Image: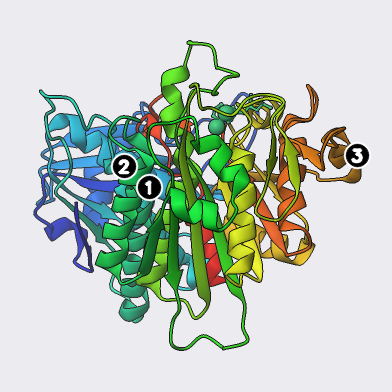
Amino acid sequence: MRTELGFAALAGIETELLAVLAGDSQTGKGPETKPAPALLTDDEAVKAAAAAVLASGEFKAGANETLLLHAPAGLKAKRLLVVGLGKQAKATVHGVRNAAGTAVRFAKPRGIKELVLALPVPLPGMDGPEARASVRAAAEGALAGDFDADAYRSERKDQSVQKFTLAAPESPDKTALEAAFAEGVIVGESQNFARTLVNEPGNKLTPTVLGQRAAEMAQAVGLACEVHSTEKLHELKMGAFWSVSQGSEEPPALIVLRYAPEGAAKDGPVLGLVGKGITFDTGGISIKPADNMEKMKYDMSGGAAMLGAMRAIALLKPKVRVIAVICAAENMPDGKAYKPGDVETAMSGKTIEIINTDAEGRLVLADGLSYARQLGATHLIDAATLTGAIGVALGLVNAGAFANDDATFVKFEAALKVSGEKFWRMPLGEEYADQIKSDIGDIKNTGGRYGGACTAAEFLHAFAEDVPWIHLDIAGMAWIDETRPYIAKGPSGIGVRSIVEWVRSF
Ligand code: BES
Ligand code: MN
Ligand code: ZN
């Protein structure tokens, strides 16, 4: 999808579809009050074209509600689409992001290949950072909306939108808005890059192929990249990572990306991004039930999020050093597979008693965290589809975030305000650590029925130790089961936007 920011007056724009946003401006309560849809534009021609239908009360401006007018009077556009933002008083840039996605997803099945979205005016503080944030969010939302997961359908109709234009009102601050738009495009495309990887089935995207895709991306954006395999795992004594991989015919991939900008202070922070890259999780010898097992191709979503984030970082060029370590393997049952009861020695030297071979993510991450530390990371963030338990705890609404350092987490919370992604902080604690003490070794890989997401996080904590660290458990949020007006079902790309913003905050 090509993207462009323009500053033309709306009435004169020739386009297949002009989308404008509307908020519900009704503020009162009680049985008498009716929704009062109000167009968020000061273009008189657009207002006149939509006046009658808005007065009819048929359209309530609910979030992502749409209304289409053909041949709108007084406009050069062939169609006028009104997209609801919900209650105007509560409108946020995140609503704008979704509305942009809704406009694009409205166009797709109708064969509309090109559209223009009017930047909503007025929003609170419209000429300050709010305008920039809306511009950026609109670009992100439009790109996210364009993605569909049907890559392997032979009769696939290419419904993608070819051109998306955001029309902003004339502004003294064009350069700043253009920069914000360019940022949004980078972040949106990077999120889609991650989603494309996650969508690949396990037979097409093996650990080796994931390594190749990472290397191609790194080459394209100018990142240093190394992809190692079995030999390097042995050399580094990555017993935990290797144990997961040893049951598969497919060799593991240890993917390392490095971003070292010239301007970064020599003694400044080095951020270590560690991703779980299980390209397929059968559960291994502790095999999973057949129902929904096909979904376990998305068990590399954390690794994909880190690759998407690194792509955006390489293009946005923040002045901080970043290293990404993605531990890719396939978790399979086999004569050579690791077994419950086995004791493995991790890279850090800690011994791990295997209770359940389906708790494999924490094993590959244990060594990934140790390696990122060895490479000089001063701060760590990991992302993983780690536990079903996080979905039980938080539903499919929030992803889980854990941290051993409040100051580092505060930065992440600030990043969430920009990204609009929903993460909820979950507890760590000695009591959870007690649940994973082993009788035979230092630690065991499962902690029993209760607090599964927290014991998994404590397992990782044992390898991050006191390095400031954030753990993102995205298992409940990495795959969307039902299409929404602004985003297709399938891989969500969650994490990319927040991780990028967290990195930029250093
Ligand atoms: N990849 C799964 C977690 C998962 C579950 C991701 C559902 C996405 C959706 C992980 O490797 C796993 O199997 N975890 C186990 C841990 C248990 C054995 C302690 C789980 O959550 O059941
Ligand atoms: Mn598993
Ligand atoms: Zn897994």
Q: What SS does tag 1 mark?
A: helix
Residue at image x 20%, y 37%?
A: 107
The quadrant of the picture occupied by the C terminus is bottom right
Label 2 SS: helix
Residue 302 rendering spot, x and y as whole percentages:
50, 45
Residue tagged 3: 431
Dots 2 and 1: beta carbons under 8 Å? Answer: yes
Q: Is residue 443 above or below residue 120?
A: above
Image quarter of residue 99: top left
For mark 1, does the 10 Å Cα neighbourhood hold few (<14), some (14 to 19), or many (20 or more) residues? many
Residue 277: x, y in percent? 47, 43
Q: For the residue marked with disc 2, what is the amino acid?
A: Thr
Closer to the chain start, of discs 3 and 2, is 2
* Left or right of 282 on screen, residue 48: left
- For label 2, the residue is 196
Compared with 457, 490 (above or below) is above
| Marks 3 and 2, how far apart at CA | 39 Å
Q: Which mark is residue 194?
A: 1
Around disc 3, counting alpha carbons within 10 Å, would you say few (fewer than 14), some (14 to 19), or many (20 or more)? few
